[in-house]
Image: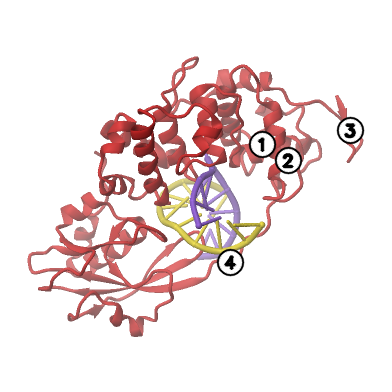
Chain colours: A red, B yellow, C purple
Amino acid sequence: MTLDQRNGNFVTAPSAADLLAWYDRHRRSLPWRAPAGERPAPYRVWLSEIMLQQTTVAAVAGYFVDFIRRWPSVEDLAAAPTEEVMSAWAGLGYYARARNLHACAKVVAEEFDGRFPDTEQGLRALPGIGPYTAGAIAAIAFDRRAAAVDGNVERVMSRVFRVETPMPQGKPEIRARTEALVPEDRPGDFAQALMDLGATICTPRKPACALCPWMEPCQGRAAGVVETLPRKAPKAERPVKRAAVFWAEAPDGSVLLARRPPKGLLGGTEGPWSSELTSDTDPAEALVHAPFPADWARLAGTVEHGFTHFTLQMTVFAATGVAAEAPAGARWATLDELKEAGLPTALMKPAAHALAALHGPAAAKRLRKRPK
DNA sequence: GAGCCGTGGTA
DNA sequence: TTACCAAGGCT
């Protein structure tokens, strides 16, 4: 028991044992998790943790199974062409993760003989692995006494300890609080238990406090401020930017696909030719950005896509029966090849828009991803 | 440290 | 519809 100076309440500390007991009864079964009491393969832990960065469990599950089936080991993944990895990742978002994933696989396969480092510090040095992911892999795959502080843990800890300092200023305190709680025994289960608690009980809205193993010691609940935590500064509003997308079809029905530069927005992905997506392009002056001269027709309507920091409004220009060389960095591809290439959602939208306009809605539907 | 970097689900 | 947000990392 300690005294909370802010309100004079006596509070008991949350215990790892209580959380682990709850976890033993309520742990989620997930594709990357080993059965209770077993340690999952580091490759699977790493792959899942990268995919789960800022991405929901539901979105990741299918991709994880696909990747494991296609590349069962880190050596297999390292040996794959980068283009294939990018295609397999298409639709998951944050494409720098896919580039770093492949780079990391190569380092592990070629320099570490296929074995992941088993310490936070060693893991932290690999591409795509930051403080959170290093802690998660060290704890889950190697049972190291490491804290894995993600958005879930931030929420749980800010509530249990009533940390009212706004993020990100409050992060250091939350990390310290978490590290102090990690048990010597079962640190990997502790990390996963904390995430399960955040995902299923201590949710952003309407947390199920009555079911929480830490209801008793929760200071946020005692103060009646649970749902207001963690505190965050208001986000800046998203500007709208305009771009032109050029859908070109050759006489044989193949379409023009361009590979985007490796860094920046949608870096390394393929899609229809377009003006620079991050600059604001007036559709009335868009034709200067076309891949080649042609009889470009502006299609009716626009296509919108929301990114984290801006909304993109795309005007689609189409040309059919085009007999032209593909510009450098681009190629003519059949629609089957386009599906194989995998387009980011932002560019799948204008592609579907063009197909629907030129060939009817049925043609656009064929673009949709099918379960393998 | 703050901006950049996707996507789909939810209320 | 808008707004928030989900197992963050890089620059």
Q: Tell me if mark 2 has few (under 14), some (14-19) or many (20+) residues whose alpha carbon lies within 10 angstroms of its own.
A: some
Answer with mark 3 or mark 2, whichever residue precedes in sequence: 3
Which label sits in the foreground, 1 or 2?
A: 2
Name the residue tied to disc 3: A9
**Residue A31 in view (yes/no):** no
At mark 1, the secondary structure is helix
CA–CA distance in space, label 3 to label 2: 20 Å
Q: CA distance from mark 4 to mark 3?
A: 40 Å
- Dot 1, how many residues are within 10 Å of its Cα: few (below 14), some (14-19), or many (20+)? many
Q: Which mark is residue A237?
A: 4
Q: Is residue A198 visible?
A: yes
Chain letter for mark 2, please: A
- Mark 1 is on which residue type? Val
- Return the residue nearer the eye: A326 or A126: A126
Q: Which residue type does callout 3 highlight?
A: Asn
Name the residue beneath numbered marker 2.
A173
Q: Chain of mark 1?
A: A
**2 and 4 marks in contact (CB < 8 Å):** no
Mark 1 or mark 4: name the one nearer the start of the chain.
1
Q: Are marks 4 and 3 in contact (CB under 8 Å)?
A: no
Q: Earlier in the sequence, mark 1 or mark 3?
A: 3
Name the residue at the right extreme: A8
Check residue A264 in the rendering and tell me which mark sits there, or answer none. Answer: none
Q: In the rendered view, would you say A103 is above or below A30?
A: below
